[in-house]
Image (cartoon, rainbow, N blue to C red):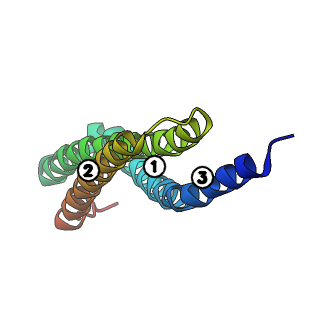
Amino acid sequence: MLPSTDITGIAHVIQMAVAPVFLLTGVAGLLSVLVNRLGRVVDRYRTLDGRLPELQGSARESAESEMAVLGRRTWFIHRAIALCTGGALLICMVIATLFIGSLVSLEVSMIIASLFILAMVSLVVGLLFFLREIQLSTGHIHVLPR
């Protein structure tokens, strides 16, 4: 059995890890939104690609133009997913480093701060890519005649 001071130390580390765990929950929600958007973009692209052979004239040009925008949107969503996933992994590393530092009595505050800053930078850039994808999606809304 662990001495009470060890249990108190572990309890303190768990308390410090709660905020990053909540942050992970938020990132997971964001990733869910990004994956759903990616799925919708891919579905729309496949629909247009399937209809392309039967389209002619301005309808074909419109479909090809929309497919180009969908390709750009896919690029931004992929990067946003990669960056937000990277941020989530860095947050997990923060949590693991908290526990490792406590268990082996190492001074890890600089490592934790660095990992957390990298996680925030990754999330901020991922959100910027997400914002750009949203701008692309709302700026190029096209509905083809059936």
Closest to the camera, between mark 1 and mark 3, is 3
Q: Residue furthest top?
A: 104
How packed mark 1 is, by other alpha carbons closer than 10 Å (few <14, some 14-19, many 20 or more), is some
Q: Under tag 1, what secondary structure?
A: helix
The answer to whether residue 8 of the structure is visible from this angle is: yes
SS of the residue under disc 3 = helix
Q: Indicate which disc, 3 or 2, sits on the residue closer to the N terminus.
A: 3
Q: Does residue 47 show up?
A: no
Q: Earlier in the sequence, mark 1 or mark 3?
A: 3
Amino acid type at image mark 3: Val
- Residue at (19%, 49%) from the top-left corner? 69
Residue 119 position, x and y percent, is 35, 47
Quadrant (top left/top right/bottom left/bottom right) for the C terminus: bottom left
Closer to the N terminus: mark 1 or mark 2?
1
Q: Are marks 3 and 2 in contact (CB under 8 Å)?
A: no
Residue under label 2: 121
Q: Position of residue 31 (x, y in %)?
A: 45, 52
**Mark 3 lies on residue:** 13
Which mark lies nearer to you, 1 or 2?
2
Left or right? Give the position of 48 relative to 24: left
The local secondary structure at tag 2 comes to helix
In the picture of the structure, the residue carrying the numbered disc 1 is 35
Which mark's residue is nearer the viewer, 3 or 2? 3
Taking depth in this image into account, of 23 and 57 the one nearest to the observer is 23
In the displayed structure image, the side of residue 144 where residue 136 appears, left or right: left
Tag 2: amino acid: Val
Q: Residue at x 23, y 51 (%)?
A: 125
